[in-house]
Image: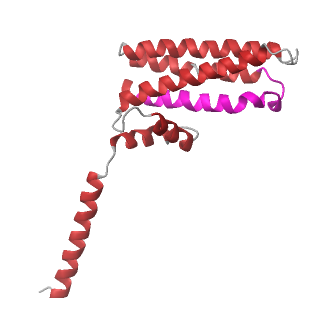
Amino acid sequence: MPSLHHSQRNFVVFIVFMLLFIHSAHGIDPTQEWIDKICFQTLNYGFCSKTFEDNLKSPSTDILGLTELAIELVLKNATNTFTYTWTILNNATTSPKVKPVLAGCVKDYQTILKDFLLASKDFTRKRYKKMVARESAAVKPIDKCESGFSHKSSFSFLAERNEQLRILISMSVIAGGYVAY
């Protein structure tokens, strides 16, 4: 026959277990779970997570909302990067050696913008597989832009912007993949 001490200990263990279970069941945040699922698959979890959290329209955003947000973030970032690059290209002090490469990058950012504007339309029309295909193709123009520079140091002014754009595109592709498949 179990002792009173043994029964009390089992009861305490049971209560602790139940409290932990109840706390964790109520503590589940579906939005944060989606953000974690998406961001753990990117190259930079911290950037991804912070970007989503800083731009959420609602604390209870579902996967469709996160997908739409990711598309919007890519469009905003690509527009800013396009404008920045175009401004440097048209600056009188920019080296003539760099101008052809910058012109190529401007075209590459235009391609990304076009792809994501079409992806946004696909999202609105619930053509999610087509949306993901368009989004996935958008990384190639970034690589093409960077390949135009002979030395990494010569495009350092675009490196961080391109890295952020890559992560944003991957966020969009990953979120879109959850919606499409």
State the image coordinates of residue 116 (x, y, percent, origin top left).
Answer: 52, 16
Residue situated furthest front in the rendering: 92
Looking at the image, which residue is at 81% across and 12% down?
Answer: 100
Quarter where residue 87 is shown: top right
The answer to whether residue 39 is visible is: yes
The answer to whether residue 41 is visible is: no
State the image coordinates of residue 176 (x, y, percent, origin top left).
Answer: 43, 26
On screen, residue 115 above or below 10: above
Horizontal side, residue 8 vs residue 113: left or right: left
Residue situated furthest left in the rendering: 1
On screen, residue 100 above or below 173: above
- The answer to whether residue 101 is magenta is no
Horizontal side, residue 8 vs residue 95: left or right: left
Image quadrant where one finds the C terminus: top left
Looking at the image, which residue is at 17% across and 81% down?
Answer: 7
Looking at the image, which residue is at 19% across and 87% down?
Answer: 5
- Magenta residues span 148-177
